[in-house]
Image (spheres, rainbow, N blue to C red):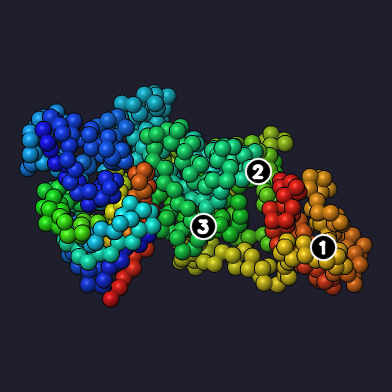
Amino acid sequence: MSLKLSRAVEEIAVRTCERAFPEEGCGLLIGQVPDDFDAPGRVLLIDEARPLPNGWDASAKTNKYLIDPKTLAKVEAELSGSGRGVVGFFHSHPTVPAWPSPFDLTMAMPCCSYWILQIKDGKVADSRSWQRTEDGRSFIEEEIILEG
Amino acid sequence: MSIDIRLPTALRAFADKQEKIGVDAGTVGEALEQLFTKHERLRQQLMSPEGKLRSFVNVYVNDDDARDKQGLNTPVKDGDTVLIVPAIAGGSTVDELELTTAEKARYHRHLIMPEVGAEGQKRLKNASVLCVGAGGLGSPLALYLAAAGVGRIGIVDFDVVDESNLQRQIVHDTLSVGTSKLNSAEKRLKALNPYVNVELHEVRLSSANAVELFSRYDVIADGTDNFATRYLVNDACVLTGKPNAYGSIFRFEGQLSVFGLKDGPCYRCLYPEPPPPGLVPNCAEAGVLGVLPGVIGTMQAVEALKLILGIGRPLSGRLMLYDALEQSWRTLKVKKNPACPACSENPTIKAPIDYEAFCGLKEKTVTIPEISVQDLKAKLDKKEKFVLLDVREPHEYEIAKIAGSTLIPLGALPERFAELDKSAELIVHCKMGGRSANAVRFLREKGYDATNVAGGINAWSEAIDPSVPQY
């Protein structure tokens, strides 16, 4: 189980989250949808990180993120039939560790990668990627492989 | 009415990779029901057990949110598209969760006590405890934490359930033998209380992962059975500022304390140095009264709940000793060590260290010659001349033995080693290889040619002769 991305893609997510600090940054991870997307050992190859605005009210943005469903629907429509899709999401945890919170778990979709970046004092301090189990009870950490 | 349902990428894997599925329905609810009939795995993803749409699922009819219309009863007509779009949200939030009506009924006996009440119960729901180990201590501990409604219970373990665990590890059962302890524990805890979250960490707790793991929990409960992990748990608790509800057991005796509170001592204040390796046998070697971890693990749960609720006097600065044979409790005072390497004002331990080395476990593996049970079998088959020495206790010898062995219990070896022929090759075994390693070290010091059997008689039973019972 792993998440593969290039340094350029990583850079976009890191910069988005560092700029959002002390609020949470977020966005989509787009890539080819693998045949074994629902397999626990699947490998995702991300070719694009697309930053999106955090949809919560200003007061909630420091510890929550929200991606507007209409925006997501629009991107899904744009990718329709291409073999690519929204296969994961990234967001930041300002200050606190890059482990999924209970709220992350409640809201998580299966199959996808949830890449969490810990931002401390405006700089990325740690980053970890997670896949929700099919039964929705827990997250399993996956390896992040940087290429190129 | 012919309707198209469109699925997001994340859910297509559960619908034969289709993006668009045609159904014939009059309402959104009917359309979804047909979708679920065709693709049953989608139902679990989108609907709660009560049959409602999960909170993150948005359903649009063409461009309109079904929630703004009539929800699942919203009518659809020929050519409409029903769009399922997840609300992608999450974050580091620590928003307080409120008690549900069902939870209020379940926790009634807590709610009517002013020391807990609805406020305290909510605190439990929003709290998290990490149980290190799903064994003898972890079993009653996790069960009572789950029953009490601690919202997030983490368990670290990487073992599988063995039949010999069931004499005391009551979170597991006979059907779980051979399966992962974590899955077995989760099944039982969720059956006991479906309102709590059980988080499974199938890893060996190590210097590399402990600090990060502990940082996610409010209270750590140490239920480990070895000194290396115990020092690691202590240091990681001190480093992350988390209290440690500590318990340990040995034969008929138990210990209990709370370490790592701000003004209280830590485990290192009590025991600055581990005992020499091999001196204190573990439960697998020395045995343990099955109910003893029940007593101590339950007390750890009491301390964990008190810490979360902020009531009573935590067992900090005090070490309680339980003696099951005497049926007595003694309490000793434990002072904070002003020069403690972990918890003093000027600590020297600033990150987890190498605990195997600290506990002297590393040299053991390098200096002692070992033989596998397979090689031992080959030697026996070839009728090579050597003495097979068994250093277990006589009652263990009665349960299981390897034919042709000589019994001298480890404790009697210093008095009786002279009985052994100094010119002979000695091959020494015990139950699992721990005691015999000590015997080999002792015998080699006395000038004998001694070799340890890796894994002991249990490995023999496992790999060579299943008719020898494991115990």
Tell me the element at label 2. Answer: helix
The residue under the point 77% across, 65% down is B378
Tell me the element at label 1. Answer: helix
The residue under the point 37% across, 34% down is B195
What residue is pinned by disc 1? B380
Q: Which subunit holds the residue at mark 2? A: B
The tag earlier along the polypeptide, 2 or 3, is 2
The type of residue carrying mark 2 is Ser
The CA distance from mark 2 to mark 1 is 29 Å
Res B440 visible: no
The CA distance from mark 1 to mark 3 is 36 Å
Question: Does B431 appear above or below B137?
Answer: below
What residue is pinned by disc 2? B164
Q: Is residue B213 left or right of residue A118?
A: right
The spot of residue B470 in percent (x, y) is: 71, 47
The spot of residue B396 in percent (x, y) is: 79, 47
Q: Which subunit holds the residue at mark 1? A: B
* Crowding at mark 2 (Cα within 10 Å: few <14, some 14-19, many 20+): few
Residues marked 2 and 3 touching at CB (< 8 Å): no
Look at the image and tell me in which quarter the N terminus of chain B lies.
top left
Q: Which subunit holds the residue at mark 3? A: B
Tell me the element at label 3. Answer: loop
- In this rendering, which labeled residue sits more in front, label 2 or label 3? 2
The type of residue carrying mark 3 is Arg
Instruction: Say yes or no: labels 2 and 3 on the same chain.
Output: yes
What residue is pinned by disc 3? B204
* Crowding at mark 1 (Cα within 10 Å: few <14, some 14-19, many 20+): some
